[in-house]
Image (cartoon, helix red, strand yellow):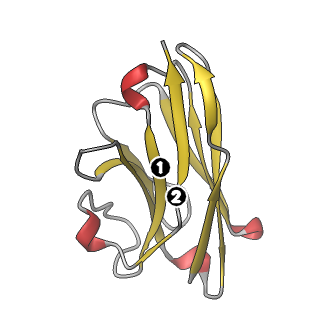
C-alpha cells in the first residue's frame, strides 16, 4: 500500500484545513486508517482514526470536537478536516494503514503497517 498525504500549509489560529490521504496499490477499503502527527522534538502521537467503512471513528482528546476524519473508499481517499486550529496543532501529519483490524482503532504507531510521507501544518498565533 502506498499512501500520499496532502493539504497541509500555513493557517492562522482559529482557521481550518483539510488533509487528504490517497492510497494505491492494495484493497484500501478493507483497512483502518489512522492519522498521527509529530511536532519538532516530540514523539509521534495519535490524532484520529477511521474504520474500514467509516462507521467508527476515534479521536485523541486534544482534537475531539475540532477534527473529523472521513473516507471515500471509491476514491481510495481519507480526509482529516481540522477546524478551530491552535498553535499546538503545528506538526507534520501522517496517515497510516492498519491491516490487522477493521473496527478497533489502535492509537500507537507500532500497530500501523504503512505510512505516508507526511504533510506539514503550521498554525500561527
Residue 41 tag number: none
Residue at x 61% of width, y 24% of height = 11
What secondary structure is marked by label 2? loop
Residue at x 59% of width, y 72% of height = 3
Residue 93 tag number: 1
Observer-nearest of 16 and 69: 16
Q: Position of residue 51 (x, y in %)?
A: 46, 62
Residue at x 42% of width, y 21% of height = 87
Observer-nearest of 113 and 75: 113
Observer-nearest of 40 and 99: 40
Viewed as shown, does residue 51 lie left or right of 119?
left
- Callout 1–callout 2 Cβ contact below 8 Å: yes
Q: Tell me the quarter of the picture where residue 104 sits.
A: bottom left
| Residue 111 in the image: above or below residue 56 | below
Q: Position of residue 83 (x, y in %)?
A: 56, 24
Which residue carries the number 2 mark? 118
Labels 1 and 2: the sequence-earlier one: 1
Q: Where is residue 16 in the image (x, y as percent from the top left)?
A: 62, 25
Viewed as shown, does residue 66 lie left or right of 4?
left
Viewed as shown, does residue 87 lie left or right of 78?
left
Task: Answer few, some or many: residues within 10 Å of disc 2's Cα (few below 14, many 20 plus, some between 14 and 19).
Answer: many
Q: Position of residue 7 (x, y in %)?
A: 67, 45
What secondary structure is marked by label 1? strand
Separation (CA) of disc 1 from disc 2 = 5 Å
Position of the N terminus, as image quadrant, is bottom right
Amino acid at each position: 500500500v502506498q499512501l500520499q498525504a496532502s493539504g497541509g500549509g500555513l493557517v492562522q489560529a482559529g482557521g481550518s484545513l483539510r488533509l487528504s490521504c490517497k492510497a494505491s496499490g492494495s484493497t484500501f477499503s478493507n483497512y483502518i486508517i489512522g492519522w498521527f502527527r509529530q511536532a519538532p522534538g516530540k514523539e509521534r502521537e495519535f490524532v484520529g482514526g477511521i474504520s474500514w467503512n467509516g462507521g467508527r471513528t476515534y479521536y485523541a482528546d486534544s482534537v475531539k470536537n475540532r477534527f473529523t476524519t472521513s473516507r471515500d473508499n471509491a476514491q481510495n481517499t481519507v480526509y482529516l478536516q481540522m477546524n478551530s486550529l491552535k498553535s499546538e496543532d503545528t506538526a507534520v501529519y501522517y496517515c497510516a494503514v492498519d491491516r490487522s483490524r477493521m473496527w478497533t482503532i489502535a492509537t500507537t504507531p507500532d500497530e500501523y503497517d504503512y505510512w505516508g510521507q507526511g504533510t506539514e501544518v503550521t498554525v500561527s498565533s
